[in-house]
Image (cartoon, rainbow, N blue to C red):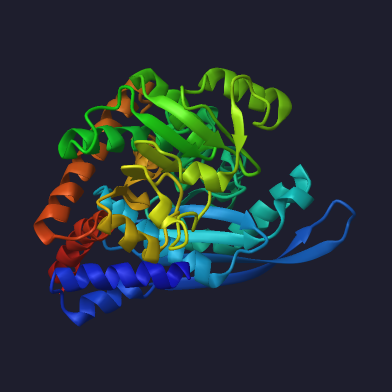
Amino acid sequence: MELENAKKIIKKATEKLNLPKQILNILLNTEREVKVNFPVQMDDGTQKIFTGYRIQHNSLLGPYKGGIRYHPEVNLDEVSALSIWMTIKTATLNLPFGGAKGGVICNPKELSEQELENLTRAFIKKISSIIGPQKDIPAPDVYTSSKIMDTIVNEYSKIENIPIEKARAVVTGKSIENGGSLGRNTATARGGQFVLKQAIEQTKIIPTLENATVAIQGVGNAGGNFAKLIIKDNAKIIAISDSKSAIYNPEGLNINEVLEHKKQTGSLPNASNTTDITNEQLLELDCDILVPAALANQITEKNANQIKAKIILELANGPTTPEADKILENKNKLILPDILANAGGVTVSYYEWYQNINQEKWTAEKVDEKLKEKMQKATQEILDKKTKYQTTTRVAAYINAIERLAKKINRKN
């Protein structure tokens, strides 16, 4: 489904641009698909065979870039769709990267720390010839972490027989002490905040972020950090959720208290001065801004007519189905699409790679300043394209990216 959705939007964007069929074909097909099977030593002394993928979609703008996920449901279709999204996302932000994605079929919750390390090293041995600082730069994704990225650097430096300092640029999302960038942990949320502010300023769909009511679905890295950031803009967060439940207060939540309660108890219900609601109810609340920051396919044709928010900021990947998109656009809702709204992470990944390649170490302020500039510029471009082509914000974002890719294709031909 994800692969079909991505391809549909690419087709729409190329039609709007009147691009020849051969450009569409290049964008719809991956340049390389690698499937590997590899043995991993388990703690009980046995060996187990795992399957992994690395899909390299497009390298027109630079080395491939994209995360590696560890999940029981990893499959070729999903990883291919995500690699296409990465190509579009890096082009949307005008980063000198292409798109890729990787994954290993496993349940990391059932593996020990040592087994995870063994799995990571075995997978990297299998794909080391196709990754590298100027070839393909992986990053963390679902159930992978900075610790796993550090392991990849270590293994890659052994395989290539190069010092750790030279191997660091092979991945991004590393720990700070191993060449990671300051500002990486909050980059997705911070990027989303910059996109939102620019969109409000440009469209005037609401007067300002101050006192705007916000509902956030998801309290993880993206949702939780976004909540902490926008209360500094004096926005009023009226609801927030985790995977099991949601809480609501029309007068505004005390976010720091809520996050502390979640940390202490592991859940959201019973936080002081809140009412328990469902995740479904949260999406349909009367508010200015809705922030889906959890799972895909949350806003569908079944609930799109009940969405009251004026702005939908997609911090999650694919939270709105194509059918829901149409309904929301017809109701004049402003959708700030995932490939723009959550691109802060890949943008700061680029800054991390740049710092590693050039042996630099930027301050958090410098990272923040550069991120703001990139996110605001991309938002401006996309909203201008939306008006120019009389289309949805999502298609406008794809148009913005595909124009850059098409120029490269034309130059090569």
Name the residue located 13 percent from the left edge and 49 percent from the top edge. 384
Q: Pinpoint residue 128: horizontal percent, then vertical percent.
A: 53, 59
The quarter of the picture where the C terminus appears is: bottom left
| Position above or below: 274 against 384 | above
Query: Where residue 278 sits in the image (x, y, percent)?
Result: 60, 43
Q: Horizontally, is 401 left or right of 389 in the view?
A: right
Q: Residue at 50%, 33% (x, y): give it.
A: 239
Give the farthest residue toward the bottom.
21
Indicate the position of residue 42 as horizontal and vertical percent values.
82, 55
User: 379 or 99, which lies in front?
Assistant: 379
When asked about the image quadrant of residue 46, the answer is bottom right
Residue reaching furthest left? 388
Q: Is residue 382 above or below residue 187?
A: below
The reply, left or right, for residue 347 in relation to residue 104 is left
In-image side of 304 versus 125 (left or right): left
Q: Residue at x 51, y 71 (%)?
A: 77
The image quarter containing residue 205 is top left
Q: How many marks?
A: 0
Q: Is residue 222 visible?
A: no
User: Which percent across, then down, holds residue 96?
Assistant: 27, 50
Closest to the observer, 296 or 37:
296
Q: Relative to residue 221, is residue 249 depicted above or below?
A: above
**Between 171 and 299, which is closer to the camera in this rendering?**
299
Residue at left offset 12%, top offset 53%? 387
322 over 380 or under it: above or below: below
Residue 194 appears left or right of 384: right
Can residue 176 be seen? yes
Q: Quadrant of residue 166?
A: top left
